[in-house]
Image: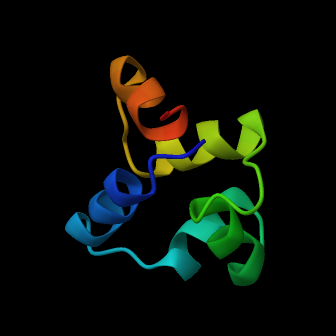
Amino acid sequence: MVNTNKLKGLIREQQKTQVDCAMAIGVKQAPFCQKINNTREFWLKESRALANYLQIDDSEFMEYFFAD
């Protein structure tokens, strides 16, 4: 499960949009919104691409993409 608040906060902090993030991982905006809101799962490839795009350190990856 994605840590929605933490991920959305980082996107805002970096002044990026969900459209920017969707393009960075190769999906359309609607599926990206579903993924970030936990109604659709992120594939590992997508979460790694988003982490790379948002410059999330490997040590913090789990905090963003594997929340309880």
Q: Position of residue 12 (x, y in %)?
A: 28, 71
Q: Please name the residue shown 33% across and 52% down the image.
A: 6
Q: Residue furthest left?
A: 13
Q: Please name the residue shown 35% across and 59% down the image.
A: 5
Q: How many marks?
A: 0
Q: Position of residue 2 (x, y in %)?
A: 54, 46
For residue 51, side relative to residue 43 (left or right): left
Q: Position of residue 33 (x, y in %)?
A: 63, 74
- Image quadrant holding the N terminus, namely top right
For residue 15, side relative to residue 43 (left or right): left
For residue 14, side relative to residue 8 (left or right): left
Residue 68's place in the image compared with 26, above or below, is above
Q: Residue furthest top?
A: 59
- Looking at the picture, the colour scheme in use is rainbow
* Quadrant housing residue 29: bottom right
Residue 52's place in the image compared with 62, above or below, is below
Residue 36's place in the image compared with 64, above or below, is below
Q: Please name the residue shown 29% across and 57% down the image.
A: 10
Task: Give 62 or 15, whichever is nearer the viewer.
Answer: 62
